[in-house]
Amino acid sequence: MTTFRGVLRQGRGWLPLIGAAALLGSLIVLALPTVLGRAVDAVVAQDDSSRWVLVACGLIALGIACDLVEVLAGTACVAGTTAWLRHRLVGRVLTSGPSATRGFDTGDLVSRVSGNATDAAQAGPAAVTAVAAAIPPIGSLVLLFLIDPWLAAAFLAGIAAVVVVLWAFTRRTAEISLAYQQTQGRIAAALTEALAGIRTIVAAGTAEREERRILRLLPQLHEQGLQTWQMLARSGAQAAVIGPLVLISVLAVGGVQLVNGRITAGEYFAAVQYAVIGAGLGSLTGVLGELARARAGITRAAEVTALQPVGYGTLPLPEGPGRLVFDGVTVLAGKDILLDDIHLDLPGGAAVAVVGPSGAGKSVLAAVAGRLLDPDKGLVLLDGVPLHALSKTALRTAVKCAFERPALVGSTVGDAISVGPLQPVRLLASARATHAHDFVSRMPDGYGTPLSKAPMSGGEAQRLGLARAWTAKRLLILDDATSSLDTATELQISETLMGDRRRRTRLIVTHRVATAARADLVVWLEKGRVRAVGSHHDLWRRPEYREVFG
């Protein structure tokens, strides 16, 4: 879970330096009026004032150095915290799995990792700066009291009003900042959806409609941004009105005390300067606005880091043929039942086709078998061991999946096939087995061709996905992973799958009658239940089964 305090801890290497520079700068601001007041008194008394002038120049130079240190350390702190937070967010997204992240749109997640992480990383420097910025007004009040209690009373009456303005500004800005970031996330999500379906949009001629859909929230974003600036302007204006009133009241009281001989001319000068410093409390609106945006960013990041990562056990996978058992498996999506009390005992080393009409639960069954989704009830066992009890290495080495629309990741075509360190021998063997080598070898740089420069058909992308999954040791799951292949290539790959010399268990979700006919066993699903299990030849006698294939 990401918290404000947790983000602050990440800047602990820089925050003390920022704090020290800010504190020293605030003390210099408080010291300057007194030093300059002493110089004024020296001039009035016709004494040597050069010493106080030199001290003032030294303090000014030191103040500039403090500002430089604060800026440099703040930049480094934000950069380091942003990197840490992005690493944490990306890691949590990837380790939580598809079911946990289903509630987030892709574009919204990208928005949180990119923009919101930077906002959240401002928390440390902004908090330190806010605390340091409060020291001069407080110090001014104390020093005015030491000069004359009546000066402090006049100052305090005005500053109380400024504090009320700042409190209202901070509370309202935090709400608007969070809403602004949420709207940004929704726009990013809509844009990501459009980019994923850009070919369909162009082909359908609906680009203008999609543009309106993506940008329909732009007026809302504009309104929220406008509200932020209005809040800033209103608070600044209120502080700007109150500030001169504070100064006038201190000037008036100080003038009376000067005339009555209770304070010196130098003390009067210093009191005026402290009134100016105290009235400058309104300048905190910028820092507090930054702090509000940081809190909003942390809130958005916390929603992601609150996701529970997929838990793994510690057991190794014993020797076995790859027997796959579904013991009372039920999967729910809200009130909908996706799989209903599934009981299956699939023999090891068999090629098992999973068939059924659309919405029957075929892909859900495949996801549960690959532990991409944990069942709400029941267990899935591989050679007698529940999948959730296996160690991550044992599970992901033994079980691999290929999908209808594989996501190809990596820099090159070879990276897209390889899992882990590149092993040329295994890479070539997987590519040849799935007939991916046929088209990869014709690319300009072969397996070293950058993915961005390797345009592929849907069938070629599926073959790369198959090659990536081909290294499975015990269970190979294909979720409609040959649907885009031409008939000849599908036949070649099907023959390779059915005649797998390594005798792995193969779970094949398919809509093709030829694939089901070549399988050792067919699991027929309907409405999340097992309708029948048997050979394709036996099931083919039933008209309802034949209707599954149209």
Image (tube, rainbow, N blue to C red):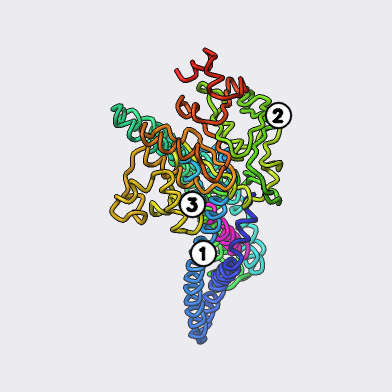
> Can the viewer see residue 491?
yes
- The stretch of residues the image draws in magenta is 118-139
Look at mark 1 in the image and give the residue it sits on: 74
Mark 1 burial class by Cα count in 10 Å: few <14, some 14-19, many 20+: many
What is the total number of numbered labels drawn onto the structure image? 3
Q: Seen in the image, is 484 located left or right of residue 323?
A: left
Residue 198 figure quarter: top left
- Vertical order, 263 against 177 (above or below): below
Question: Could you say which is closer to the camera, residue 462 or residue 258?
Answer: 462
Cα distance in 3D space between marks 2 and 1? 56 Å
Label 2 vs label 3, nearer the camera = 2
Question: Could you say which is closer to the camera, residue 299 or residue 464?
Answer: 464
> Can the viewer see residue 248?
no
Furthest-bottom residue in view? Answer: 48
Look at mark 2 in the image and give the residue it sits on: 328
- Vertical order, 456 against 352 (above or below): below
Residue 132 magenta:
yes
Q: Secondary structure at mark 2?
A: strand
Query: Which quadrant is home to the C terminus?
Result: top left
Look at mark 3 in the image and give the residue it sits on: 240
Cα distance in 3D space between marks 1 and 3? 28 Å
The kind of residue tagged 2 is: Gly
Cα distance in 3D space between marks 2 and 3? 70 Å
